[in-house]
Amino acid sequence: MAAALFADRIPDHADSVEVSSAGLLEGGTAVPEEVLEVMAPYGIDLRAHRSRRLTQPLLEGADLVLGMSRRHVQEAVLLDPPCWPQAFKLKELVRRGEAIGPRRPDQGLRSWIDDAHGDRTRSTLANYSDTDDVEDPYGGPIAGYRSVADELAVLTGQLAGFLWPEDG
């Protein structure tokens, strides 16, 4: 849901951006019916989407790696240690974006991401905290999916606004 919502919020004339999605479970699974239902009001059809397992080659060269939870970021950094400076929980990056402000007109995406990374240390990945985690609605009631979709729509909109502020 997050990848589809974020891709939908990237301005057409923005930097060349490829958004992809991968997770920690085995790949090849269709999205749950609940996801199809809650994404429809956003004009997003995920019927053709199949899950994909996170791998080191998917992370290589990524400008930005977003996880919904600390566990996702941990796994990404374990698979590809050099991705650490650009690996964030979505909520964490939005929170940091609020602190540093939107990308300046003369600033590249990577520079803004480096500013957002700031003084983070890898040790934060070892501490248990669900701060900044997006709840996983899988297996729960449709209301949970709807709530998460709404939250992701806000978060991805905020992130797009930080990365492409002239379109805000």
Image (spheres, grey):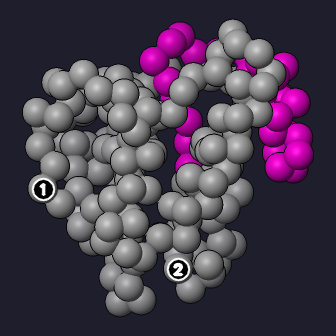
Label 1 element class: loop
Q: Is residue 61 visible?
A: no
Disc 1 marks a residue whose amino acid type is Asp
What residue appears at the point 71 percent right and 25 percent down from the top-left corner? 144
Residue at the disc numbered 2: 165
| Depth order, front residue of 6/47 | 6
Quadrant in the picture for residue 76:
top left
Quarter in which the N terminus is drawn:
top right
Distance from disc 2 to disc 1, alpha carbons, whole Å, reads 24 Å
Q: Residues within 10 Å of mark 1 (few under 14, many from 20)?
A: few
Q: Residue 108 magenta-drawn?
A: no
Q: Residues within 10 Å of mark 2 (few under 14, many from 20)?
A: some
Type of secondary structure dominating the magenta stretch: loop
Label 2 element class: helix
Does residue 42 appear left or right of residue 122 in this picture?
right
What residue appears at the point 44 percent right and 46 percent down from the top-left corner? 91
What span is in magenta? Answer: 19-47
* Disc marking residue 119: 1
| Depth order, front residue of 101/23 | 101
Does residue 49 appear left or right of residue 99 in this picture?
right
Q: Is residue 22 visible?
A: yes
Task: From this view, report whether residue 103 is shown above or below residue 71.
Answer: below
Quadrant in the picture for residue 148:
top right
Disc 2 marks a residue whose amino acid type is Pro
